[in-house]
Amino acid sequence: MLPPFLLQWFNIKGMKQIFLACSLFLSILGSSNPVETGHAKASLITNIQDSQQESFYVGVRLEMQEGWHTYWENPGDSGSPFEAKWNVAQGVIVENVEWPTPVTIPYPPLMTFGYEGDVVFPFKVFRAIDADLSSISVDFDFLICADICIPETASLTLDLSSATPNILLDEAIQNLPTEFIQTQSIVEDGNLKTTFKSSQPISSAYLFPRQDNLFTYTPTQELVNLGNNSYEITLPVLNDEAAFISGILSINGEGFQIEEELESASGMSLWQAILFALIGGLILNLMPCVFPVISLKVLSFVSMGGDDNSKIRNHALSFVGGVMSTFLSIATALIIIRSTGSMIGWGYQLQSPVVVGILTLIMLGIGLILLTNINFAAGLTTLGSSVQSRNDYSGSFFTGVLAVVVASPCTAPFMGAAIGYALLQPSFATLPIFLALGLGFAGPYLLLALKPEWISALPQPGAWMETLKQFFAFPMIATALWLMWVFMVQTSGDALILLLLLGLILGIAIWMIATFKGRWKWIGMLATLLAAVQVFNNLPENTIGMVADSSAEQWSLDIESDLQAQDQAYLINFTAAWCITCQTNEKTAFARDKVKEYLAEQNITYIKADWTNRNEEIAIGLARYERTGIPLYIFWKPGMLGSKILPAVLTEDLLIKAMQ
Amino acid sequence: MKIFITLVATLSISSFTYAADIKLQNPSINEKAPNFVAVDSYGKSIQLSDLKGSPVILEWTNHDCPYVARHYNENNMQSIQKMAHDAGVIWLSIISSTPGDQGHISPEKANTLTDSRGASPTHVLLDESGEVGMLYGAKTTPHMYMIDANGILRYKGAIDDIGRGMQFFNASFDKAINYVSSQMDQLIANQSLTINSTTAYGCSVKYNYD
């Protein structure tokens, strides 16, 4: 029998070691399930229904003793999230944990975030159909704390081929905070103020920030009812560098995801954004989708050489007017759409197959008109020779409109940053930036309006112009072909056939206009319109994305933080079928062998985010970089403080250099 | 429902204690470090402003915290303390645990621990009330602060870059970047440090919250 003081000493000093030793001993024995770790019982559960399932969940269940807790991914002022090391058969992939909604565990003046009692951590599993399911095991290391903290460990193994689905896991998945809630946040007087809507009466709310070292974790967060189901929650900012808030908003214990750009944190000033918009607009003239239309405009100016200056000036001004009013309309439309709370971006209209279909027909129509040399006078547009014969400036105006419409799939360098700023700032900043963009785009023609005599510096007009004009039909038709591909990606092969039929009817209509006289020559056009309305009204839902790229990983919102945590270098390609700049870069850089070899050699994970169809998460991902449009290329490797944005126009050498 | 009840419960408890106005301060980097007076394990009163002329390193500690224990068991903390000692830097180990909580020890026990672990702090300060801890916003053990010879706060945060996460218990201290030892030269030169603020990791400081 030991003397009492020794026994006591042994109890206090030795208990932890004994627990640790026991759990270690158990884990060495392996294949236990459940395992007593000291202050919790850990078990591995699953919801797999049958052995043919390709994706299902496994869960680590922790039944903690009364008064003990473990931590969320951001543990708060102290503590640590758990670490799970999986051991699975070939062809089985276990994803990162999907964190349940945490609770506040206050130790005033400190605050920690985590879980108490009985908690299940769900992990999604993907498996190849021939993969062996007989055993899946995990080394689960976690910190469990009451007043004191103890690192504990559980080595768990589960035979999935004979496991029965556990309802607790399904409940845990059901309660996961997967839904995003719309918020509007600003940083004001050292506080983050986040506004959100809730139709339920709120008895408690807490915003758990996912990021470390940006906010002060207070025991309670001030909640103000703004009326009209709107609430404002306040948390003190620790660090002015907070550029976005990512976290979980717990309302009455139910969790919602939050991802938002912080308004005051923009690195760009309004003037800088306007300057970028001007430069971007100017460069936009040279982008592949605009070039044919612009060339035609230049041609029509060439044909005006020798005309009197006031006429040239008026045509140039009409064109500028067309460009500016279109940009103004786009800006207004964007402001209105944004006020409804949707995430929007440049080129987003091309996420609608109807818009893509209409653009296809416009491009095709222009191509046919150029080839057949018919004169639409004051109609759709006036391209080329007819302009100088009449004092009809509406043609120039509509060419301006058309140039902007066809420019929409393009993003020029500088433009992405400027538009990103415009759309994330309050409305008063949106208009000037879009006007600057228009001004930059129309800049050369504005110069021409000021100095019409400069036109004589261009080549003399002549028969060559007619030939060149006809030739320009082909870039237009090529653009139409590309749009058809986009349309097919967004809809289906059947819908594409319908679009091609519309093209045929349009061709006939144009031929009728060119060949026949009198009023009824327009019947073909009317038929095209009716048929188009019919087709576009009955389009199937767009569900599929671009053809899967086997060399690229699927993008997700957490992928960057996950890879950075693993010290894994990565390259992210935000792209879409409708983004022609993206597609050009795809061909000139990403698809090249040299680039592929470099990525493999340097062990850089290549990730693709496909925005061909509407996708709120990708819009949020772009917003992190203060962008609303694509292309956007992101690169990071260990040693870099933050990821960097690569140029919008890439070649293989440029891309490789940017990664060195 | 259970989560809901715990949330409501924890919120109401916390709002109650919040009324007692316990609040962590957050001293600014490259500004004057807040002055304090505390009693060391020999009963001597130590005032920060009296130490001017020498750089000072503050180490929040709790010998039973597994994070602290690993730093001491593998001689990591001692080697930095020795480095500071040899360079003429004053090292204050501060215990802010409240009586009855983990890490709270008698002055005698503090001295025994210093001897048995081969540690070389200039003083071990017993901050039972947690006053000094809250003045500096100390959250974890360990939590490190570096003050230069002019009394300017140059660093607050983690001891090294291993950081939060269970990897701490397997990570090698040799491969880690130690923010304190690697920046001691800059501190002695009274310069602003390359890395001056990080997130501290470890056990929570056991303040008196009941």
Image (tube, rainbow, N blue to C red):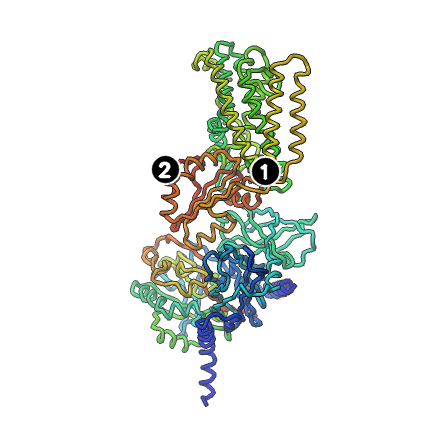
Q: Chain of mark 1?
A: A
Q: Is residue A286 above or below residue A316?
A: below
User: Which part of the image, by quadrant, shows the C terminus of chain B?
Assistant: bottom right
Classify mark 1: residues with Cα within 10 Å, few (<14), some (14-19) or many (20+): some
Circle 1: residue type: Ser
> Which one is nearer the viewer's eye here, A128 or A518?
A128
Q: Chain of mark 2?
A: A
Residue at 32 percent of width and 55 percent of height: B189
Of the numbered discs 1 and 2, the one sitting upstream in the chain is: 1
Q: Is residue B50 visible?
A: yes
Count of numbered circles on the image = 2
Residue under label 1: A492
Q: Is residue A374 above or below residue A433?
A: above
Disc 2 on helix, strand or loop?
helix
Is disc 2 on the same chain as disc 1? yes
Q: Is residue A546 above or below residue B107?
A: above
Whole-percent x and y of residue B191?
35, 53
Circle 2: residue type: Asp
Q: Nearer the viewer, mark 1 or mark 2?
A: 1
User: Which part of the image, by quadrant, shows the N terminus of chain B?
Assistant: bottom right
Left or right position of B152 against A108: left
In the picture as drawn, the residue positioned furthest to the left comes out as B86
Whole-percent x and y of residue A69?
54, 67
> Which one is nearer the viewer's eye here, B149 or A124?
A124
Which of the 4 quarters of the picture holds residue A65? bottom right
Classify mark 2: residues with Cα within 10 Å, few (<14), some (14-19) or many (20+): few
> Spatial distance from mark 1 to mark 2, Cα to Cα?
36 Å
Say the numbered circle drawn on residue A653. Answer: 2
In the picture as drawn, the residue positioned furthest to the front comes out as A130
Residue at 50 percent of width and 23 percent of height: A474
